[in-house]
Every structure is written in C-alpha cells, then in structure tokens.
Image: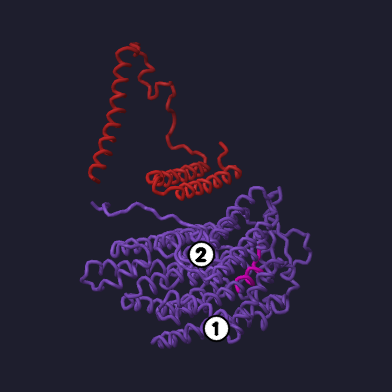
Chain colours: A purple, B red
Amino acid sequence: MIFADISPFTYTPGATDWLRILPELILLGTGLLTLMADLVAAPGRKGWLALVGLAGVIGALVATVMLWAGGTYGDAFYGMVNDDRVALFASVVILFAVGVGLLFSPGYVERQGIVHAGEYYTLMILAALGMMLMSSASNLMMLFVGLEILSLALYILSAIVTTRRRSQEAGMKYFILSSFASAFLLYGMALTYGATGKTSLAGIRAFVTTHAFTMGSGFGPLLVVALGLMAVGFCFKVSAIPFQAWTPDVYVGAPTSVTAFMSVGTKVAAFVGLARVFLFALSPLRPTWEPVLWVVAVLTMIGGNLLAATQRDVKRMLAYSSVANAGYMMVAVATHTQASFQGLLIYLATYAAMNLGAFGVVLALERRDGQGTTLDDFAGLGRRNPALAALMALFMFALAGTPATAGFIGKWYVFYAAMRGAHVELAIIGLLASLVGVYYYLRVVWAIYFTEPATAPLLVTADESAPVHEPIASASATATGGVALAEPATATGIAMATRVLPAERAPVHLATWLGLALAGVLTLVLGIVPMLMVDWALAAAQTLVK
Amino acid sequence: MVATGYLFAAIFFLGGCAFVLGGLAFADTLNALLLKGRKRAASKFDTYESGEIPLGSAWVQYPLAFYIFALLFVAFDVDIVFILSWAVIFQQLGWFGFVEIVFFIAVLALGLVYAWRKGVIRWI
C-alpha cells in the first residue's frame, strides 16, 4: 500500500509561475528562434544570428532586473524553481557572460571557419538557459535538469570546430568525464532522496533539521555517502582539484569564445547549485561536509596556482587560473557564513568581468589554426596593438588581485569573510597562493610590454600573393607571430598553400572590441565603485543563508 | 485496492497474449488444413522462401549516416515515454497538462523541422 497516501495532483500553475521564469522563457524563445532562423540564413553569413541572440539576452536581462525590482520572490511550479535574489543575481552574471560570449563570436566563428554557426549561437543561448535554471533550482530534480541542459550544450560547443582535432578531443573528453561526474551527482541525489524522502531543498533542510543526525540513525550513513557523492559531482563541475584534470584540455581545445563563456557561466551555475545544496539544504550537517570542502579548497588554491605558473600557453594558463579561482570560491563555501556567501556572489560577478576579458584578448590574437596564444605571441604586443595590450594588462592585473580592479574586491570579500568566519588559515593559504598568481599573471604583462618577438618581423613573407608551401609558411608564421590563413588546396595536389600576414594585419572584429570594452569597463567599475553590487550580493545572501 | 488494479492489469495482459497466440494458432491450423499447397520443391528448403539467396559475409558496410536515423528514432521513442506518462493522468492535469504536452510536442516538431531542412531525413 505504498501509494495509498498519494493525493491527486492538483497543482495548477498560474500567471505568477510563468512570470517568475520570464527570463528563462525569453531565452528559450530566443534559442528556438535562432534555430529556426539558421534554416533561412544564407551559409557563411550567419553573424546576424548573434544579434538575434543578443537581443534575447538583453530582453532576459531586462526581465531579470524587473523581477529584482518587482520584489515578489518565491517558488514557482510546485517548488521546482525559485526566483529568489540569489537566482536573479546569478542570472544577471550568466546573462552578462553569454552576452559578451555572443559579442566575441561573430568574428571568431568566421575566422575559425566554424561550419555550424547557426547551431553555435543556439547552443550558446540554451547553455545559458540551463545555467539559469540550475542556479534558480529549488529542487534536486530541477538542479540536475539545469545541469544537463548546460552540459549537453557545452559538449557540442566544445567540439564544434570540426576541422580541428583538439576541439574534437576536447568535446569527447568533456562529454565522457562530465557524464561520469553527473552520474556521481545523480547517485548522491538519489541517496539523499532515499535518506530524507524529499527532493525539494526546503524539504531536505526541514528533514535534517528535525531529525537528529547520527551514524547510528537509519538515514545517517546513507546521507554521508550522498554528501560525498554530491561533493564529487559538484567539485568536478566547478573544476576543483582533485577533479580538475579535464579543465585545461577542454578549455584549450574548445573555441575560445566558448571557453570564455563556459569558464564563467558553468562556475556561476555550479557554485550557486553547490551553495543551495550544501549551505541551504544540508546546512545542519555542516560538521560533516565542512572538512571535505576545506581540503578541496586548499588543494585547489595551491595546486591551481602552481600548475598555472608552469604554463607557457596563455590560454592554458588561464584554464589553470580558473581552477585556482575555483579554489578561492570554495573558500567561501567552506566558510559557510552569510558574509562568505555574499563574498562568493561578489567573486563570481567580478570573476565574470575579468575572465571574459582575458579570454577575449586571447581570442583576438588566436590564429586560424588555433595557435598563437603562447607567451611568445604576446611578446611586443604593446607596440603592435596598444589597445589590446592595455586591455590584457588590465585583465591580468585584475586577475592578480590589484586594488582598484574587480579582482581585488572579490578576493577581499572572500578572504575577509573567511577571517571573520573562524577560518583564518584558509585566508592565509589563499593569500599565499594568490602571490603565486601574481607571478604568472604579471608575466603576461611583462611579455606584452618588455619583451620583443623572438625573430625580427623582417622574416615575414612580405609578398602575400605568393603561395608558400605549408611547412615553411607555418614555421615562419609561428616564429614571427604572423597569421597563417589556410586557402583551399590546389588541384595539383601540392601541400596546402598558405598566405602569411604580419600579426598587425589580423583584424579584430568590431563586436569583439565591444565585448572587450564591456568587460574592461565592468572590471574597472566593479573595482572602483563596487558598493551597489556588494549591496545586491548581500541582499541575495540574506535570502539563502540565514 | 492497488492489488486489484494490478490484478486487472495482469488479466488484461494475459488475455491479450492469449488472443494473439490463439489467433495465430488458429490461423496457422486453418492455413495448414485448407490453403497450404502440397508441392515439394527445392526452393522450399532455401533460407528465404522468397527466393532471395543469402550470399557473402554478414559483415557488410552500411552508411555511417544511419546513426542519424537511429538518433531521430530514439528522440521520438523518448517522446512517447513522456506522452504516455502524461496520458495516464491527463484528466488530473487538466488544461495545464494539455498545454504543457502541446508545447513539448511543438518543440519536438521544431526539432524535426530543423532536421528536415538540414537534409538529415533524406534517404541515402
């Protein structure tokens, strides 16, 4: 008679429910619209799809701000999603990330010769939709659905450069490893349900608050295993050590515009999800999970920074830097106070601005073959392209945590909260680890302004029209930081002819400039006048962590 | 109450099986008694009585593009799973459930339109 107590399902969503997921609905509509618009768009001329997507993102942003200002927060759809201030704050960051990602895209998609441009824009928007759903989930089921929406879209996006092997490899690696992690997470959720009989976060919280938690109790061991499995799943998604192995390969192999977007968006969604499960639903079990996250935070901060310091490829360095940044954010979760959660949200917002910008500069320099992002390629950028160089320097200083930039504000709030929350040791380890970060971030600035390209630019093949055999061309292109543009192979069957242009001639798309400018302005604004964002983050933190 | 429900389901299941099997047995018997020819011929002992002669290895290559058909099939299979579970309680769900399932099918239809336009379901 298991089913005897089930009453008929009578919940009918009203207008309020639909209103509360209005930003998500707008994004969904935009995603379907771009999918259909792709069918009528002429091949090779699909840049305007980014504009359609951008319009949808701005619409969703407006809806989010209106929901924030409107101020009636609460559950929607039978407690599946919750448009509380945490969700709205996260939504704003995610929408900013996808907006800048879309701005980066048209020039990059064209240059990389991505065939599936229409699908690219659709998947970007749908990934953002998944991120928003995950960060607004108030039920384990919805959390997982959101996670899968964003993951599936990102698997394809990672592998979307069909002509580049590394991109294919990135997609495959991400798919296999991430599915594995999803399985862990799902198993953890199933065991949580088994232990508490609830999938809603509020229900789980009520259960673990009212029932004494001991290993002797019937649900105790089950819940401990569930905690561990869910911690594994989340740590993988935020790329915390020891689950970081996929991060550098995927971030380097994926198209840079996708990397910029996913390094920010996935972190926002996964950390807010992690916070909802651990800081809210399982908050009474703090003594059980706190040591685990403490160890993960320390390992990630130290390991991420040390690994990043050894990289010569700036894109790969930024991938490891995102691991290190996950460590700082993990400090905020492990500290588990209202102030630290506020710090986490602030860190996510500031990280979005500076990390998007840093990847944007890398994207502007990347050549068609996916090369051209090492420190040698940055050498002498200060003279070749002063504006790009200045922006990169700004983002590097910000990531290093220099005052008057966004990075300082983020680190300040996280470490201050750690000290207030009786975790002085985490703050000290974090500060020492970020000193290592200063080294590798400023090394890029050093390369930009104080080093010269390895060989004199005279060696660049001046005659652009003369076809050169591939090995010579790519060799000289690599040596001088030039741009190699592959042309269709000639019918005579000679090796693919290439044209070599000096790096100065690599045009940076107008939209890319716009995205870089947005990220740069935000990096400065959040660093100099952060108070508005800090207040919003506090308002958001108060709704989740009491 | 629940047990009775399962009993009914079991009776229906067995009844269905009996109907199909019985029908087949009946038809087969009828066929054997009245309609079957009595001629013995070499072709009777072929693998396929249609005359198709199995030749060569079973390990043949077929177009890789068939995976897309498989994907489409799986998509609609999953579609059926959701629609069935909706159909079971559609009266309780009322108009909300109806609108939801229509929306779900509409999104799936858009996917089909997309696949169609991309030339995915063209016969090779």
Residue A462: x and y, percent?
A: 78, 67
**Quadrant of the image occupied by residue A367:** bottom right
Residue A527: x and y, percent?
A: 59, 83
Residue B119 is marked as: none
Which comes sooner in the sequence, label 1 or label 2? 2
Determine the chain carrying the residue at label 2. A
Quadrant housing the C terminus of chain A: bottom left
Q: Amino acid at mark 1?
A: Ile
Image: magenta residue range:
A358-368
Q: Residue at x 27, y 52 (%)?
A: A3
Q: Amino acid at mark 2?
A: Met
C-alpha separation, residue under disc 1 versus residue under disc 2: 24 Å
Determine the chain carrying the residue at label 1. A
Magenta segment includes A367: yes
Q: Secondary structure at mark 2?
A: helix
Q: Are marks 1 and 2 on the same chain?
A: yes
Q: Which dot, 1 or 2, sits closer to the camera?
A: 2
Magenta segment includes A267: no
Residue A472 appearing in the image? no
Q: Secondary structure at mark 1?
A: helix
- B91 to the left or right of B68: left
Residue A282 appearing in the image? yes
**Quadrant of the image occupied by residue A525:** bottom right
Q: Is residue A89 positioned above or below A404 on the image?
A: above
Dot 1 corresponds to which residue? A409
Residue A439: x and y, percent?
A: 55, 84
Dot 2 corresponds to which residue? A132
